[in-house]
Amino acid sequence: MTHTKPVNVGLLGIGTVGGGAYTVLARNAAEIARRAGRPILITRVADRNLELARAVTGNAATVTLTDDAFAVVRAPEIDVVVELIGGYGVARELVLEAIKNGKHVVTANKALLAVHGNEIFAAAQEKGVTVAFEAAVAGGIPIIKALREGLSANHIEWAAGIINGTTNFILSEMRDKGLPFAQVLKEAQRLGYAEADPTFDIEGIDAAHKVTLIAAIAFGIPIQFDKAYVEGITRLEAADIQYAGQLGYRIKLLGIARRRAHGVELRVHPTLVPEKRLLANVEGAMNAVLVKADAVGATLYYGKGAGAEPTASAVIADLVDVARASAIAPSLRVPHLAFQPDQLRSDLPILPIDEAETAFYLRLVVEDKLGVLADVTRILADEGLSIDALLQREPEEGEGKTDIIILTHVCQEKQANAAIARIEKLAAVTEKVTRLRLESLQ
Amino acid sequence: MTHTKPVNVGLLGIGTVGGGAYTVLARNAAEIARRAGRPILITRVADRNLELARAVTGNAATVTLTDDAFAVVRAPEIDVVVELIGGYGVARELVLEAIKNGKHVVTANKALLAVHGNEIFAAAQEKGVTVAFEAAVAGGIPIIKALREGLSANHIEWAAGIINGTTNFILSEMRDKGLPFAQVLKEAQRLGYAEADPTFDIEGIDAAHKVTLIAAIAFGIPIQFDKAYVEGITRLEAADIQYAGQLGYRIKLLGIARRRAHGVELRVHPTLVPEKRLLANVEGAMNAVLVKADAVGATLYYGKGAGAEPTASAVIADLVDVARASAIAPSLRVPHLAFQPDQLRSDLPILPIDEAETAFYLRLVVEDKLGVLADVTRILADEGLSIDALLQREPEEGEGKTDIIILTHVCQEKQANAAIARIEKLAAVTEKVTRLRLESLQ
């Protein structure tokens, strides 16, 4: 080994992910040290549940357990604090206190960084410490490293990711089994793929936290979670998954960050994706991020986006990086948000969803009468929407109603809104129009 | 910008990839500098074709052109040499001379590193310079970075990659169009996907160079190209692609590196892959590498494995990394082969192909007689091979011959060899047995 001085790590939270980090670091200690050039040791653990902490650490003599996380972030011998508590509250205080005490920080906390990241990175910058967050986006997939370092030659055009395993599991099940959302959600909760309160996942908030971080490092802009457009999967109907399938598409909850000439689209919503794309074939709780960049073209990164050990994999990779970075001048390190802190662009605002450019899937429930289709297509043409595909369900004998499914070419969201408003006023259109966005991802 | 001192780069070779590197670096100069914290400038270019060099650089006043590459690697103001000449001969001399002169090196030359990498990395280590080679494996996909840094917490179990675009294009076309190898090769040459002398690609040598490098950094072993088992796609028949499809598999040329208890499997050959795997759906000239590791599980990295700008993307990312690494002590840098140089394992030899463990696809041409299948299955059972699936073609009226296709479970290669030798001695088996390997990749 080149260095013998170990890196002393203080671990905040030894639940699922914290326990995974502890276990993987113990199991692979020798192999990790062979790579890092020095041992990485967890010497302090803080958790409110001391019994759990004792069980996970096996009461190892080399680890000091406490229920006072602030004692860990202030402990003189600690080099790096790993924050795995989650949430915006005490986690923020602990991270800021760790920074204040000159500790580097590794965190898996996407919510914290999406909401308070600018404050946290500024504090870290001022103090000359690193805040690493590979585990905050897509779990074990090294997507932050790919965007910040692997693609550093590129002008990144867009990124689109399946970055929430819970919703991807639910959508895969809905499609495979033809079941409605509510029933699959219950099953997902029973299997542990969805939490008791699944709001953050199913409403798209978790994915929005992550894509907000992706947008920042892809385009060199500040973190702006409050500007993201967020739409979850709770209103998605099994019928639309089926119609999409008939037209050659899968529906995925995507986090999309796209650079436009005068701003950035930042949005999370269910999205039709051509079934030929690899991204459309990412099933179950798996994650994947597709990145389009000018020199390299499209690259895709796939793996487990959650779970104890996949997340631990990212946390520990950050520890190895931080161990290296801690010995060098801050100006030589990879910048937190990929671009040098004085080089973030303020002239690329997040665009309102009205100005997003995307294709649309529209499902209309209409009376089965002559001329309805002519009225609808006339409105679309008036509003500048051109039609890419059209599907009309054969009504049952005597049913009197049918579904018309229309795929449009790319247009501005506000054009689609205008067309939909007019269509909904047609007498033969009996229900609100179902509208989903469609991305060709080319 | 934090640093104003630019990184001065000497470019050896301004053909396809060199031209791409020059162009991308010029086009994205501002964005790259915003990331790197300092400008990265190509100040010298060496190429035998000075006219080409003048055309690509537009005769820029900031660039000195020469046809003497040795003058570039010795030029005092050059910080990093980018070697894009290719081959084992003068490229080796130039890289060693650059190292001797204290220059860092970035190269896309997999052949050079697979054959002379141990010597080159030892020289670099002694001189305290970095030799970066992201572009040498899978073009623009940041797979070296993922393996060396992104997965540093993991005990890597295996990696399997589509790492040669030419052969993947040919195999995709053979499957799509049902055409024989020779005809598709000609088409690939016409389209520029295959070179005039395609030997390195179609015989699997290029893929073997790359998987040799992958094995080294995945397992912490020296580079041992001469121990790799290499089988290309030239003898692959369209019929086998079709039968594989009927059984739910695609045939891909994979580079496989697998850690076993007492050694490493290192092999390149056409491989049946379950069509449900993302890797099986990587089509055309695209590349992808699937990595299985103990903590993170399976991760996959997909993108363009060749071409001017995708390769340039990797070369320039290396330049940004090297610019950072050049300012810090060698012991703090990411080691060339992922593990500290004194930590490479000598107790993990490359295993002979006889000891490889894999499943098999066997195609037998047999006389359509009672009892043949009984004889064949008896031999398989005797040799310890168990059958996973079996397919028998219905012979045409009066044909008298038929095909039997057998998929085995995983066994040792030498077991399969013994069984095949015995099967070929059966009177009813009229041709040599066609044997392909099958990997479930789970």
Image (cartoon, coloured by chain):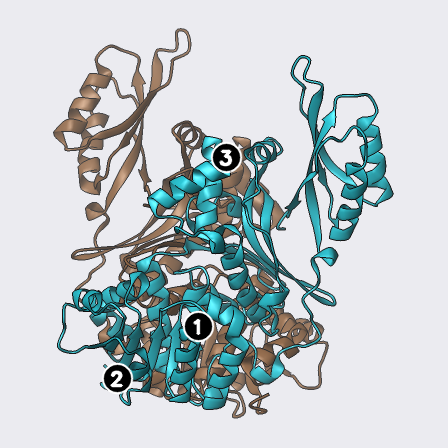
Chain colours: A cyan, B brown
Q: Is the Cβ of the residue at disc 3 closer than 8 Å to that at disc 1?
A: no
Front residue of B41/A233: it is A233
Element type at mark 1: loop
The residue to which callout 2 is attached is: A2
Q: Which residue is drawn at 47% across and 75% down?
A: B106
The kind of residue on which mark 2 rests is Thr
To the question of a shared chain for discs 2 and 1, the answer is: yes
Query: For the N terminus of chain A, which image quadrant?
Result: bottom left
Tag 1: Cα neighbours inside 10 Å, few (<14), some, or many (≥20)? few
Looking at marks 2 and 1 on the same chain, the residue that comes earlier in the sequence is marked by: 2
The residue to which callout 1 is attached is: A89
Q: Position of residue A88 (x, y in %)?
A: 46, 70
Tag 2: Cα neighbours inside 10 Å, few (<14), some, or many (≥20)? some
Question: Number of numbered discs present?
Answer: 3
Q: Position of residue A252 (x, y in %)?
A: 54, 46
Q: Is the Cβ of the residue at disc 3 closer than 8 Å to that at disc 2?
A: no
Q: In which quarter of the image is residue A10?
A: bottom left
Residue A46 showing in the rendered view: yes
- Compared to residue A62, the image places residue A162 above or below, namely above
Image check: A31 left or right of A165? left
| Chain of residue at mark 1 | A
The kind of residue on which mark 1 rests is Gly
Q: Is the Cβ of the residue at disc 2 closer than 8 Å to that at disc 1?
A: no
Q: Which residue is drawn at 34% across and 48% down?
A: A192
Q: Position of residue B10 (x, y in %)?
A: 55, 81
The residue to which callout 3 is attached is: A180
Front residue of B361/B10: it is B361
The kind of residue on which mark 3 rests is Pro
Structural distance between the alpha carbons of marks 3 and 2: 58 Å
Q: Where is residue A229 in the image (x, y as percent from the top left)?
A: 63, 58
